[in-house]
Image: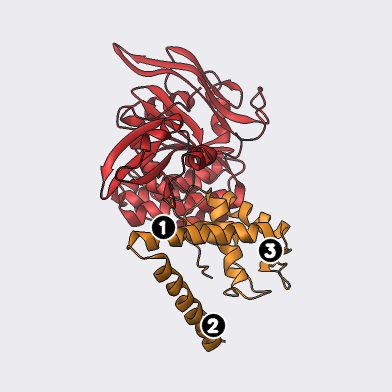
Chain colours: A orange, B red
Amino acid sequence: MALRVQIDPTDPAPIWRQIEEQVRQLVGAGVVAPAAPLPSVRDLARALRVNPATVAKAYQRLCEQGVLEVRRGEGTFVAAHVPRQDEARRRELLAGAARRYVAAAAGVGASQEEAVTSVRAAWADGLAGERGEG
Amino acid sequence: MSGSQGEDGVGGWVAAFSGSTVRYRRRLAVDGVTLKVSRGQVYALLGRNGAGKSSLVRCLLGQQRLTAGRALLFGEDAWASRPRAMARVGVVPEESDLPPDLDADTLVAWCQRVYPRWDDARVRQRLRRTGVPPRTPVNRLSRGQRTQLALTLALGHGPELLILDDPTLGLDAVARREVWDTLIGELADRGTTVFLATHDLAGVAGVADRVGILVEGRLALDEEVDALRARLRRRAAPAGAPWQALAPMGILSCQEALGGVEVVVERFDDALLAAVGGGPLEVQALTLEETFVAVTTGQAGGGAP
């Protein structure tokens, strides 16, 4: 089974952290449902062409945080009840994403007002899309 | 830095070079190389053609005598302990050393008799999966099939250490991918320690834990991949920005880019960047290929002991 995770070789974060963050985001956004199975360490390592130890480390950290759980002999699954993310960590992620967006907006010469309007529009679209799918 | 490092070579590291030097007549091929391969690690040895990669590999295999220094395998001298050590090692040499007129079936049967711990079912399953025909002589296999056969045979006796000398050399993109696939599968199953020389930087980038870069026989860099990503960074700055303020991070290169300058530093520091200020600018890590180019063209390094 595929998992929408992508390694960015120019991202300064270690690969295990990139995997950890992306899986957490997929779970947090509900793209991967609670209790859904995840690809095995071996399959995800092959798909991403990374060392299995790297994937194992990401999975292990997510297990410790209660995002994933290992069922012996069955594999790795999203936890039935994913705990809320640590508040400080959540703010950090949000601020990081905002910085990247501001850089992109400045790159196309957008004013602050235009950039904020764009976020509002994307937010409305995104929520509408989720309702449409659900 | 990685885990424990036992000095006896039993618990901590499985292979090591210490002041290793190889001289061929008047040419110095390897010049005082010191490095260690920890148990469970994937160590990638990089370098341009003729940088000394194959010489180092052959020293470890006990096929090349050192002019000075030591090469240790499982804590013992690699040259003296070769017959004992080879039972614990799997090897894929740069040029195939498989008998050209034998087929895969015959080679597998032969290996099974030689190695007490031979995993025949696994070997045959791997050959089927990678499409190596059982009855075709080695000299009529494609280069990719020959490499898969060599790699599968090298893994058949469950080696503690896998030594590969440029396993993807001369292979097309599909065959290269299959080699990395097989290797990733082995790492998932057994966590085998790997020491490999390679030119396939894109292929090895996600797989290696640690890289060494040889430049004209000397080890110009020896560092964990995660540490490299953390310290070698590229920063785009708009034209006129005071990029000189980044100097404490060690500026490796500074090039004019579209709409500004692109600065590469060798000791990135979040606090220093924050102190310099400068708005929401992208800071990127160097890819392994960019790191390799920077080191071999003499810009970066400093990771070697």
**What residue did someone put label 2 on?**
A130
Residue drawn 25% across and 50% down?
A: B258
Label 2 or label 1, whichever comes before in sequence order: 1
Q: Is residue A109 above or below residue B19?
A: below
Label 2 or label 3, whichever comes before in sequence order: 3
Instruction: Tell me if mark 3 has few (under 14), some (14-19) or many (20+) residues whose alpha carbon lies within 10 angstroms of its own.
Output: some
From the image, which quarter does the N terminus of chain B lie in? top right
Circles 2 and 1 on the same subunit: yes
Pick the front one: B285 or A2: B285
Residue B245 drawn at (x, y percent): 41, 34
Q: Is residue B106 visible?
A: yes
Amino acid type of the residue that numbered disc 3 sits on in the rendered structure: Gln
Pick the front one: B50 or B253: B253
Answer with the quarter of the image where residue A83 lies.
Answer: bottom right
How far apart in space, not on screen, are marks 1 and 3 (Cα)? 26 Å
Pick the front one: B214 or B14: B214
Q: Secondary structure at mark 1?
A: helix
Amino acid type of the residue that numbered disc 1 sits on in the rendered structure: Ala
Q: Secondary structure at mark 3?
A: loop
Label 1 or label 3, whichever comes before in sequence order: 3
Q: Secondary structure at mark 2?
A: helix
**What residue did someone put label 1 on?**
A103
**What residue did someone put label 3 on?**
A85
Residue A89 drawn at (x, y percent): 65, 57
Dots 2, 1 in contact, CB < 8 A: no
Residue B52 drawn at (x, y percent): 36, 25
Amino acid type of the residue that numbered disc 2 sits on in the rendered structure: Glu
Pick the front one: B102 or B251: B251
Q: Provide the chain ID for the residue under circle 2.
A: A
